[in-house]
Image (cartoon, helix red, strand yellow):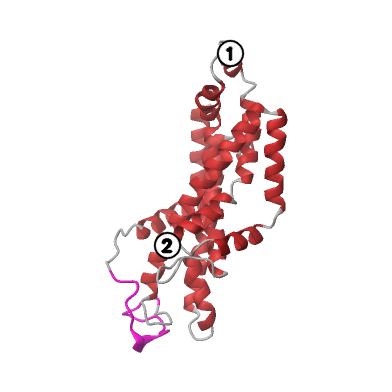
Amino acid sequence: MKNRRLELAKRTFLRDKGMWFALAFLLFIVAIAIGIGFTDADPNALNLQKMCAPPDSENLFGTDELGRDYLTRVIYGARVSLLVGVLAMLASVTIGVLVGLVAGYFGGVVDSILMRIVDVFCAIPWIIMVTVVGLLFQKGLASIVIVIGCFGWMEISRLVRTETMTAKNREFVHYAELIGVPKWKIILLHILPSIFPVIITAATGAIANAIMVESAMSFLGFGVAAPQSSWGTLLKTAQSTLSKAPHMAILPGVLIICTICSFNKLGDLLRLFVEPRAMQEGK
């Protein structure tokens, strides 16, 4: 079965040009974010004589409102956006998996209480929660990760709960309970490994969601503090210069869209590999 899934995932990847682009694009973004093939140019170096300059041979993507090289700003912004995406994903996946495992395994009153809490969080529009909490925290990378991580775990918890309810009815789990294995060991050593592929698939979507939320928070003014920048803060800054320097909005906007779509496309490929139903749909 595993070889069959791998073969189908490989065949689908080779057939779907969108997945080629998604993987190549993500590798490219990660490469420039960690500095591969990039100079040590200062993203905060000012040149007041070239404010909002159009692209030229010296500044391939022009300059911003303070004359800073915009390509350098965008590349350094990629580091912040990707870092927020990964760290917020880890936070939301950790919370979601913990809640989902406990609710799915123990069921009953515990399940009802935890799921009602999830329903309450889901009922509140995320933009309101993020705005209110964002006002309580000081601007910074840590604050953004905390806010996104604390409000991005609900769907993951529901997914993990469903998978846990299925996994706990398998024979090896019943046998472990019969011989007196502690419940926490059953959860960590038997149930968690069996649903781990589904968690990996959900994590790719969580990264895309975190990047999108970070961009929205930055656009609303709750992003990282200056002079640090992310793609969202670059978009916010571009509002005031949109008429005379449209390149300042186009580049980070395109990168945000392509990155989110690429992570979602990667999630589709992983889902095809880990879910038997997706295998049948992919034929």
Residue at image location 51% in from the left, 27% down from the top: 188
The quarter holding residue 199 reads top right
Which badge, 2 or 1, comes first in the chain's sequence?
A: 2
Dot 1 alpha-carbon crowd within 10 angstroms: few under 14, some 14 to 19, many 20 or more: few
Residue 16 visible in the snapshot: no
Residue 176 at what x, y percent from top left? Answer: 56, 15
Could you say whether the residue bearing mark 2 is in a helix, strand or loop?
Answer: helix
Say if the magenta span includes residue 103: no
121 and 63: which is toward the camera? 121
Residue beneath label 1, please? 175
- Residue lying furthest top: 179
Q: Which residues are magenta?
A: 41-61
- Residue lying furthest left: 40
Residue beneath label 2, please? 78
Q: Is residue 249 above or below residue 129?
A: below
Residue at image location 27% in from the left, 66% down from the top: 39
Question: What distance separates the C-alpha of mark 2 from that of mark 1?
Answer: 49 Å
Q: Is residue 36 above or below residue 7?
A: below
Residue at image location 51% in from the left, 46% down from the top: 91
**What kind of residue is marked 1?**
Tyr
- Residue lying furthest bottom: 49
Q: Is residue 97 above or below residue 88?
A: above
Q: Is residue 89 above or below residue 195?
A: below
Residue 119 at what x, y percent from top left? Answer: 71, 45
* Location of the C terminus (image quadrant): top right
